[in-house]
Image (cartoon, rainbow, N blue to C red):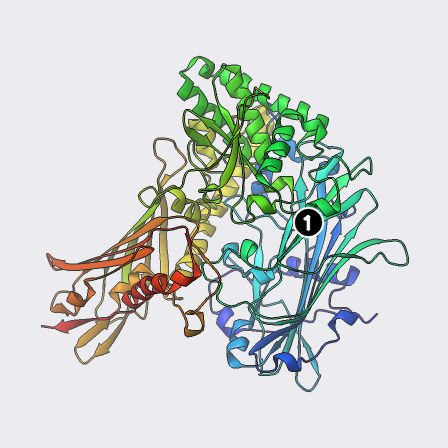
Amino acid sequence: MKKSILIITCACLALQSMAQRHINKNEISIIEKNLKSDPLLTDDKDFSINASPQWSSEGAVILSQKTSFSFDKKGLSAGTIIGRNLVGLLMALPTFGYSIYGANAGNGATKMIVEETERRKLLLNDKYSLEQYSVLYFRLYAEKDAFAARVIKKDGSTKNVDIEDAIAVDNPSAVPDIFRSYTDRRFSSTYRPNYYKIAVPDLEEGDVIEYEFRNINSKQFSNNPSYKEFYPVYYVCNRSMPVVKQIIEVNVEDEKYHLAYKNLKNTPAFTDATDKHGNKVYRWEDDNRDKYGNIKFVNRYTELPVMKFQVKYAKNNSQGLIWFKSDDDIKKDMQPEEFVEKTKIIWFEPNKMQGAAFGDDAKGNISAMENAIYKELKKHGINSASDDEYVRKAYYSIRSKTVYNNWDDYTFAKVFSALLNERKIPHEVIVTTNNQLTDLSKVAFTSELGWLIKYNKKYYCNPDEHLNPEEMPSIYNGNLSVRFNPNNTKEKETVEPLPVSDTLANSITVQVMSKMPDVTQSILSVEKTTEAKGLVKSAYIDDALALTPFMESDYRNYDGTGMWEGLSSVEEEKATTEFNHQKKEWKEDKPLMMEENANDLYNDQVEKYTNFRVVDDGRSYKKNQLKYVENFSLNEMTSKVGEDIIIKIPFLMGEQTKIKKADRTRTLPININYEGNFTYNIAFDIPIGYTIKGWEALNARTDNEFASFTSKAKIVNNQLLIQAKQVFKNVNVKAENWPAVVTVLDAAYNFSQRKLLLKKI
């Protein structure tokens, strides 16, 4: 087979001008080594397509894309991470007295490894598509990660894209989904893999870009169970452009691995494509899929054609005793009665429902976790506190574990319920689904279940890294659920919707103080304070706390396990030194990350980012609002008209959603995740010697039963004070009511684009 070698040829002035870290020689050599041992962009008949008359009028077309998964790649150094990774250290297995530092030397058998490759071949027919795909992204995090790209010109000649001038992406959340692997974990404050971006030079209309990346991902288990499930893959068939041909291939090591899938909205099914050498392969293929229409405010996984699948491992080579009895059962919709029956079996008789979190392998481990945490609570005297105080401290003790170990919801519920039983505190179990992935009738995998505990009319959810007692994520907002007594199999269960959080509980308030240090320049100095609470907080907290040592406060304030508990004095000194070094790096990297966020919000107009400071991390029961302060300056905010100045003060609220003409009609329902309100208080110091004109027109209101936008302005003591407030009143809105939502989105966008006049006195 013809091998494609990555040759270093490309440069990009636009990216070079940015003050960001370039990829280094060692990282380049890692990729070159990986490409030499296992090349990408090799000959493949699935990529022989070079044109598509059916989509000739489209600006861009995916000629072919192929996503390949290989489970369970034990020869890949168990997903070894490149370079320093103290965050990975903090996410090691819980040690319950042996310290998290020593726990990082885990057994490879506790990991499930997948090699995922994504290859795409895109035809770019117009200038807009050239702009959209002139920058490519790739990850370099695991030891075997690799990337290659090339441009196929209209005359058939090929130019390889070089990564020598690639620069680091300070915030991986900004990486487009098309460059992310499906089996990767979600980005969070503790999982921030290294991504790079590289510009593709000299693109012309009619060129083809072809790129491929290989990522190594893993799922960690707290022991080595005889049954394991990898995270499900949710594959949306429609893209932002037509797809001539798309393929999924799933390769498994042997017959102990089984593929379970559910194809929704008439998507094709998998077929057995086991090769002549007996290698087990499942193949899915789809041809000539049109681009999706307007997907703003759309729940893609429930409204668009989706193929979702999960690879499972059973040491005894048994496919039975799992969530569904057969491959046919998984294709059927589930009725509430069946949902109740299955969830109660999982809770009361887990050995009947084989799963990674269930059965004998998990039972002893969960019991050990509960015993260890209760021992810690007794050590701190919390077992004799009031019920409410005990419940909160028990919750925080669990949260201090999830910082470095990703507990599933079932494990959380089992451990938390056991801790409440230690004090004979009455409580109930709630089982529901993630509303961003599926509804109850379409459940296919046990990992799609959400397990909650209800105590004293309040709900306690798996805390991930940041959740406080009594806070419920938006993924459960208003969901249908089953509720039952965890200690009584005969007591009747209840099927009911969970509460819906309202606009008062979910809000963000942004205070912007701005001034012009020098009226001869087009720069605004800004101090911005952001305060978020309720469900809105979850959209901001990961980025706000990433690259900060927030985990220190857990151990200090909430009686969790000490970070270095169980270490010898020599080991503790080494661990503390490394952690202090990591904090120093974070202090340098954090402003770069937040500057990238600000540039996304202000359309690349940040001149200089000078400060970021967390006031409240929002991770306390008593102080549960996130609050942070930023200082930066924006350029190109003014323009001269003689002695007068035109200034874009309303734009300080940030760029708002613009609804294009093509997106003003739709057939899909609107999903807004949660009801919430967004308030922007903007203060601008009017320069001495000037008066401001046109501010009266900023007083306006657009309101209907689905959303509203209100803006007010006034002059007080030579300051222009503006308040803009946007409210979303419904989580789900029918497609026929889209025009009403659009009027509010238009009002917010038009307000942000208004300009005022500073008139020379």
Left or right for 729, reference 597: left
Task: Using the rendered image of the protein, determine whether residue 23 is visible from the camera's viewpoint.
Answer: no
Question: Of residues 536 and 709, which is closer to you in this image?
Answer: 709
Instruction: Identify the amino acid type marked 1.
Output: Lys
Task: Using the rendered image of the protein, determine whether residue 455 is visible from the camera's viewpoint.
Answer: yes
Please state the horizontal and vertical placement of residue 680, each as a whole percent of the image.
27, 54
Q: Which residue corresponds to the image point at 38% horizontal and 41% vertical from the top-left? A: 501
| Residue matched to label 1 | 331
Left or right for 227, reference 436: right
What residue occupies the far bottom of the structure in this picture? 155
Please state the horizontal and vertical placement of residue 409, each as a whole percent of the image.
57, 35
Q: Which residue corresponds to the image point at 41% horizontal and 50% vertical from the top-left? A: 731
Question: Of residues 41 and 119, which is closer to you in this image?
Answer: 119
- The kind of secondary structure element at disc 1 is helix
Please rate how many residues cluster around mark 1, counting C-alpha atoms within 10 Å: few if below 14, some from 14 to 19, many from 20.
some
Please state the horizontal and vertical placement of residue 320, each as a whole percent of the image.
77, 37
